[in-house]
């Protein structure tokens, strides 16, 4: 064991660690002060206050070294606090104070300022220098709805610049000028608002003073309580630390010890929380009478619902009732909702938003591997050599993972492949970008596999030992018509070939995919191909490989895990299986049905044909976000009882007969499961607003009302129940979750699992299945009259239907949907930046503002669906994935023209 | 220092260089337009803040440089010679005040009165012909100095022909590169840039780093006011430098050589470009040189005005197009240098010495000079000497021989010499006899041989003013990264200026604390080195300075 000495006491050293981390590890965090060092940034060596003296022998001749960037060496004698070192630190801080306002009492970080702390530690009592040049008159930047800066407080530690670079990878901040004149800039000396800042707040959290902060003053110390919980805004599952005072939320920061997000989060997680007590929050149950909502008591609402549901159940049978649960709710709530539908109503008509996003992922991966969840963890980015990102724009939709992928892609010894019709942020940095025509994923992936086989790059040993079906697969694959595939994808075959070779040659390759894979008529097949690609090259079952869907909503993984699917109950168990049915019957204490229930699109069909009488929708704005809006509206109108449990009066809620005000993620406890199967504790931060209730308790109340005994909602109690029925939750209990949660499957002893399919697949062998590319019906039927392809995307600032984010200051940063159009197409239609474009599909038409960009190719349009003013889903149709019924949002045949009439006027 | 920026800026290789493009964009108006910087940032995916951040660092790229038409040297030699006021006054007859910029040392220390106009340097009596110069006549640029070797002429040896000169290189290509490196190590040649680190060891580090891409950089950013020996080599003996780089490439398995030449030396850039053309004509560069497995090519990068770029990690950042701030070490450039690839940075004079070592053997070099300082050294004498110029002497030669015999003594009363640049010691004339020209002698006496420039401080020049000048230079050229240097050099300058211009007395303890903080706390030798001449001044000129302190 190698050792070194701290103040003449010996301690073991780690190879390669810095003197500073060596000292911190063995003594205290505070023995050596620092200013430019930060937990999530590389050593930088600018402040020099971490200097120590180092000798080669006890009390020998010393050299002064900055401990933050000097590696510790065997046998070193490190002196942390000699008189000379103390004087050096004090003298450096004195210099800093010659250019820093001494207004601590009125400063927002008073009491939580690292400069203040270090100044106190080194014992500064006076600044001896006469007044000289300084930066005390720098103006504050209050231009932005969240970010603020006051560079008179800047100490030039570069932590903000480094955070913007090393953590977020955005390069908005830099230093300008040199020497004493060097100063932080945003963009080209812009304000925060005018810069390209993505408002992730990494700089604000990194800043040791108040030079960069936010409007919530997140570094101020007046918070009395900090609660660690999980973000509601995407499947990454960032840990958040929420500061409160007297039951009011003040601000949010990201904890550095979070395994998921390591002190980072995004604009939504950090800043978009003010929706929680927005005046628009629903604050009472309501029943629609004579076309108007009337506020009623909870009892009245429950009574109304229970009697209606009982009536329908008796009159039309349990299958006349259906439920749509919410991927924004906790596992426990989702479990309760499916239990209610199955055990209390007696139908399998339960589905969730996974239907319209990742249902093909769950199905496809189950078919190939046996488990419909990410095989690996995001942490594996540290161990991989290649990333393949398909149909995902993670820098907008999964910003923290997106930032990590971008960091990966920037390094030249890594390979990154992006398959996406759009030149996404990640595609700009990628080694290979395959800008395929929307709807041709299957063609591209078949071409990739073709080339991998042709180049002899398959992992034959892996195929032989761990897979089945390869021979037929290979035969069919090698028969594909390359010329045709090249033509339909619109991508030079060599571009695809090179990417395929790069993926196959990488020692470890990981894939990530999003809704650009699933929301297609061949979504499930595409997922299976991605899985086949991993099988073909042996990229399964170890660190740095695998198939990793980027799950959309915060708990979409968990909602499916909990049984929010019409064909599988809690724990993905087949509802049609006799034995399993017995198990459920015993566990729930009632007979549960064995027939597969309605998927969401089938619910709408059933409603339109008069078979569906009641629909209970929790936290999902199906009118705005499901395809073919007018059809959804007609379905809701045709349903006698529509119960909507929501935070806000969404487009869907407007069509409700009963409204139940639920609670936001900040107002209840439970668990969310992120995209890497990590079950994390959501901890109540504040009480629900007056009049609202935790969603789980609402379901329990109605269960009780309808005669099913279910104890009150608590996460402990629910997890105790769930762990008995969901096999992979066996070892999960509320107390065991700790700070960073557990990745399922969790064994009864609490051991969790970072990597699936290490030695064998859940289904035994990995299954190869060839599926040929087929043109979507949307285009075969309509392409002639509707020659453009519209695809949909998301924007960083908004989340899904925007019900939450539009009620925060995010709305000031991005205030409407827009259409991306290629410059050539814009020119052809005489469309200029900001003009309204009328887009028309076989279903309807909408008018959207144009953003002219080469991010989309000629003939392709892309838009978002965050704003009800636009209602882009008036355009989308009924085509869906052949296997999982996930709607094809990504290929819509449209035609365009410059808008006329009313929309033209709004431009003036 | 950003790993990401190193990666992104390196993606287009050396041919498409961000920093060079910024320079081109600035050539029209003296600074790149915002639109041009934005486009460039987009092209390299680095964010416009980084384009602006880099441009704003350099004297000849920053927005303030816009509209500058002529630049006056403000280096120490011209300052001590007191020639520049007249130069400025003369130029003011033609130019507006804000059209006159400055350059810190044009390397015309031997005749002073230096200024730069439209890519050409002028000095000596040139200013008197300003009207002719303005009308496009470059003939009067002057630049006459002596070049002489005391013993064997190695660095100053006259150039033969390309084929004769590069014969030893072609011979070396037939040998095992390890054996060639061994020869260099045997010579114990130590870096001439100031730090004196053995080049053989440095090359070996780089050789041992495994990577397909490695770089040999020639640090031709001779920024020390008073030094013009590198300029001499680049302009008069460019092949000696190129030869050294080829050999360095061969022994480290590097494929690319970059000469980073300061903007203040336009003639050096031309001379090197011409020499490279000759090499290309003789097929001595390119792929598989002379049928060997060794391929090597060159790139010349012209700097844009910043002294700190002479520091090797700042220089690497500069070539990349990052802000030339000093990097922490480790990682050392040999492990992770230019574009994060293994890199060796060597000074011009060090590289120039390799021709002799490769031709005559390491032992031959080792036998010249002293035990620990082998070989010969170039020294630059300024205009206070009878015979200003470049002198090559064997290491260990008494300083007095250089001053009195070669330089012919002073033409005016001189009280001190600053040797080895602004971070070098201030040697009172009384100490001349006790010094020999080698690293050890200077270090033992509390001075620094540095790069071997010698600037005379005349009797008439107040030492307090000299301190103020040094701090001014140090603050102006500080990269600003580390706290002690960014703030300390500024406060040091303010203190000395205040004492010089008013009856303010500097607190001795405070001043001592400041110097110690700079010395021990600074990240690099810039802030760390400036206290040396100031301490020398305090020590040897205590009496003269007493009035400024309490």
Image: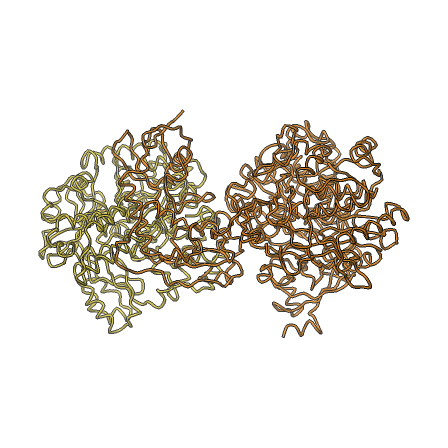
Q: Quadrant of residue A574?
A: top right
Residue A483 in sight from this viewpoint: no
Q: Residue at x 20, y 66 (%)?
A: B85
Percent across and percent down for residue A324 are: 76, 48
- Give the left or right position of residue B538, taking residue A802 as reference: left
- Give the left or right position of residue A463, taking residue A49 as reference: right
As drawn, the residue found furthest toward the right would be A315
Percent across and percent down for residue B484 are: 31, 49
- Give the left or right position of residue B144, taking residue A767 as reference: left
Percent across and percent down for residue B216 are: 37, 43
Pick the quarter of the image with the C terminus of chain A.
bottom right
When the figure is inspected, residue A735 is found, relative to residue A849, above or below; the finding is above
When the figure is inspected, residue A625 is found, relative to residue A388, above or below; the finding is below
Residue B271 in sight from this viewpoint: yes
Chain that is yellow in the image = B
Percent across and percent down for residue A339 are: 77, 41
The shade of chain A is orange
When the figure is inspected, residue B544 is found, relative to residue B126, above or below; the finding is above
């Amino acid at each position: 064991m190698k050792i070194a000495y701290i103040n003449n006491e010996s301690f073991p050293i780690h190879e390669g660690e810095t003197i500073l981390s060596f000292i911190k590890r063995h003594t205290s965090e505070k023995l050596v002060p620092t200013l430019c060092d930060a937990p999530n940034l590389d050593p930088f060596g600018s402040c020099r206050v971490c200097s120590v003296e180092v000798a080669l022998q006890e009390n020998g001749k010393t050299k002064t070294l900055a401990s933050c960037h000097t590696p510790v060496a065997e046998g070193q004698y490190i002196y942390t606090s000699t008189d000379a070192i103390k004087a050096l630190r004090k003298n450096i801080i004195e210099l800093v104070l010659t250019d820093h306002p001494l207004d601590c009492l009125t400063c927002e970080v008073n009491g939580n300022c690292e400069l203040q702390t270090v100044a106190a530690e080194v014992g500064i009592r006076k600044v001896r220098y006469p007044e000289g040049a300084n930066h005390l008159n720098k103006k504050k930047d209050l231009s932005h709805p969240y970010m603020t800066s006051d560079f008179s407080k800047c100490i030039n530690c570069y932590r903000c610049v480094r955070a913007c670079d090393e953590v977020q990878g955005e390069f908005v901040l830099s230093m300008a000028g040199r020497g004493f004149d060097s100063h932080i800039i945003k963009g080209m000396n812009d304000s925060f608002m005018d810069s390209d800042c993505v408002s992730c707040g990494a700089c604000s959290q990194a800043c040791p003073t108040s030079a960069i902060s936010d409007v919530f003053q997140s570094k101020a110390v007046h918070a009395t309580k900090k609660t660690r919980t999980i973000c509601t805004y995407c499947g990454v599952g960032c840990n958040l630390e929420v500061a409160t005072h007297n039951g009011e939320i003040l601000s949010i920061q990201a904890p550095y010890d979070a395994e998921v997000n390591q002190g980072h989060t995004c604009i939504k997680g950090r800043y978009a929380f003010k929706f929680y007590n927005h005046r628009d929050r629903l604050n009472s149950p309501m029943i629609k009478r004579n076309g108007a909502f009337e506020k009623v008591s909870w009892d009245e609402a429950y009574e109304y619902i229970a009697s209606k549901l009982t009536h329908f159940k008796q009159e039309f049978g349990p299958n006349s009732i259906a439920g749509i649960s919410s991927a924004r709710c906790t596992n426990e709530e989702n479990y309760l909702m499916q239990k209610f539908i199955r055990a209390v109503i007696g139908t399998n008509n339960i589905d969730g938003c996974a239907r319209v996003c990742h249902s093909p992922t769950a199905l496809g991966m189950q078919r190939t591997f046996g488990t419909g969840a990410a095989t690996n963890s995001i942490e594996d980015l540290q161990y991989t050599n290649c990333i393949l990102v398909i149909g995902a724009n993670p820098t907008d939709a999964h910003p923290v993972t997106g930032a990590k992928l971008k960091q990966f892609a920037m390094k030249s010894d890594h390979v990154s492949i992006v398959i996406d019709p759009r030149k996404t942020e990640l595609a700009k940095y990628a080694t290979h970008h395959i800008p395929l025509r929307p709807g041709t994923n299957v063609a591209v992936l078949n071409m990739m596999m073709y080339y991998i086989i042709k180049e002899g790059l398959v992992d034959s040993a892996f195929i032989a030992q761990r897979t089945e079906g390869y021979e037929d697969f290979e035969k069919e694959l090698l028969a594909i018509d390359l010329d045709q595939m090249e033509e339909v994808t619109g991508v030079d075959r060599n571009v695809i070939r090179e990417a395929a070779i790069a993926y196959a040659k990488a020692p470890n390759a990981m894939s990530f995919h999003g809704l650009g894979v699933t929301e297609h008529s061949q979504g499930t097949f595409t997922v299976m191909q991605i899985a086949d690609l991993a099988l073909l090259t042996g990229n399964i079952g170890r660190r740095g490989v695998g198939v990793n869907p980027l799950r959309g909503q915060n708990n979409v993984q968990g909602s499916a895990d909990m049984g929010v699917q019409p064909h599988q109950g809690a724990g993905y168990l087949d509802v049609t299986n006799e034995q399993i049915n017995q198990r459920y019957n015993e566990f729930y204490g009632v007979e549960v049905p064995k027939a597969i229930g309605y998927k969401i699109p089938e619910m709408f069909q059933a409603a339109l044909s008069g078979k569906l009488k009641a629909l209970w929708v929790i936290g999902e704005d199906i009118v705005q976000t499901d395809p073919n809006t007018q059809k959804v509206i007609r379905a809701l109108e045709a349903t006698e009882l529509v119960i909507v449990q929501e935070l806000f009066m969404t487009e869907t809620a407007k069509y409700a007969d009963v409204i139940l005000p639920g609670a936001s993620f900040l107002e209840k406890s439970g668990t969310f499961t992120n995209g890497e199967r990590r079950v994390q504790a959501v901890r109540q931060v504040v009480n629900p607003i007056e009049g609202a209730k935790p969603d789980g308790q609402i379901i329990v109340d109605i269960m009780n009302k309808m005669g099913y005994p279910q104890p009150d909602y608590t996460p402990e109690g629910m997890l105790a129940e769930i762990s008995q029925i969901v096999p992979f939750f066996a070892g999960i209990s509320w107390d065991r979750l700790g700070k960073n949660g557990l990745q399922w499957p969790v064994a009864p002893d609490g051991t969790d699992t970072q990597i699936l399919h290490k030695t064998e697949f859940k289904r035994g062998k990995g299954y190869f299945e060839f599926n040929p590319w087929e043109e979507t019906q949307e285009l075969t039927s309509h392409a002639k009259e509707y020659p453009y392809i519209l695809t949909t995307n998301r924007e960083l600032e908004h989340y899904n239907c925007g019900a939450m984010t539009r009620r925060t200051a995010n709305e000031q940063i991005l205030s409407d949907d827009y259409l991306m159009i290629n410059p050539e197409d814009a020119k052809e239609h005489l469309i200029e930046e900001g003009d309204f474009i009328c887009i028309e599909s076989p279903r309807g038409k909408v008018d959207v503002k144009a953003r002219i960009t080469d991010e989309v190719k000629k003939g392709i349009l892309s838009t978002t669906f965050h704003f009800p003013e636009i209602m882009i889903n008036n355009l989308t149709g009924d085509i869906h994935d052949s296997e999982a019924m996930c709607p094809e949002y990504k290929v819509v045949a449209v035609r365009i023209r410059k808008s006329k009439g009313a929309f033209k006027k709004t431009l003036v | 220092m950003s790993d990401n920026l190193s990666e992104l800026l390196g993606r287009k290789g050396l041919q498409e260089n961000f920093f060079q493009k910024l320079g081109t964009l600035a050539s029209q108006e003296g600074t790149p337009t915002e639109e041009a910087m934005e486009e460039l940032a987009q092209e390299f995916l680095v964010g416009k803040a980084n384009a602006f951040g880099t441009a704003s660092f350099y004297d000849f790229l920053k927005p303030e440089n816009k509209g500058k038409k002529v630049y006056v040297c403000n280096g120490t030699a011209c300052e001590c010679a007191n020639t520049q006021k007249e130069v400025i006054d003369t130029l003011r007859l033609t130019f507006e005040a804000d059209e006159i910029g400055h350059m810190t040392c044009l390397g015309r220390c031997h005749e002073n009165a230096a200024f730069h106009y439209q890519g050409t340097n002028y000095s000596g009596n040139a200013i008197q012909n300003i009207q002719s110069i303005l009308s496009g006549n470059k003939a009067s640029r002057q630049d006459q100095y002596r070049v002489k070797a005391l013993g064997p002429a190695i660095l100053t040896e006259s150039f033969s022909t390309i084929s004769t000169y590069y014969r030893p290189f072609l011979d070396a290509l037939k040998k095992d590169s390890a054996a060639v490196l061994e020869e260099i190590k045997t010579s114990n040649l130590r870096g001439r840039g100031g730090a004196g680190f053995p080049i053989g060891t440095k090359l070996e580090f780089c050789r041992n780093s495994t990577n397909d891409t490695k770089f040999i950089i020639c640090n031709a950013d001779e920024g020390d006011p008073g030094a013009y020996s590198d300029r001499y080599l680049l302009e008069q003996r460019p092949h000696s430098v190129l030869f050294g780089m080829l050999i360095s490439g061969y022994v480290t398995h590097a494929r690319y050589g970059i000469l980073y030449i300061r903007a203040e030396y336009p003639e050096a850039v031309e001379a090197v470009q011409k020499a490279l053309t000759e090499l290309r004509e003789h097929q001595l560069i390119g792929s598989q040189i002379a049928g060997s497995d060794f391929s090597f090519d060159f790139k010349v990068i012209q700097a844009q005005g910043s002294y700190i770029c002479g520091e090797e990690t700042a220089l690497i950042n500069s070539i990349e197009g990052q802000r030339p701030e000093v990097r922490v070490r480790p990682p050392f450039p040999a492990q992770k240098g230019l574009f994060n690839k293994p890199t060796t940075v060597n000074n011009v004079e060090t590289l120039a010495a390799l021709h002799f070592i490769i031709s005559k053997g390491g032992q031959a070099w080792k036998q010249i000079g002293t035990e620990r300082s082998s070989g010969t050294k170039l020294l630059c004498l300024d205009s206070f000497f009878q015979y200003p110029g470049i002198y090559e002497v064997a290491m260990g030669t008494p300083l007095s021989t250089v001053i009195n015999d070669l330089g012919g003594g002073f033409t005016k009363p001189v009280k001190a010499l600053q040797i080895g640049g602004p971070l070098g010691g201030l040697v009172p004339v009384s100490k001349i006899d006790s010094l020999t020209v080698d690293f050890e002698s200077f270090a033992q006496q509390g001075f620094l041989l540095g790069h071997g420039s010698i600037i005379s401080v005349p009797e008439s020049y107040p030492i307090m003013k000299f301190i103020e000048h040094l701090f001014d230079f140090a603050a102006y050229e500080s990269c600003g990264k580390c706290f002690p240097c960014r703030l300390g050099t500024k406060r040091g300058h303010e203190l000395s200026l205040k004492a010089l211009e008013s009856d303010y007395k500097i607190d001795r303890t405070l001043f001592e604390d400041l110097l110690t903080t700079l010395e021990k706390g600074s990240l690099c030798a810039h802030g760390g080195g400036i206290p040396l001449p100031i301490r020398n001044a305090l020590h040897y000129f205590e009496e003269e300075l007493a009035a400024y302190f309490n």
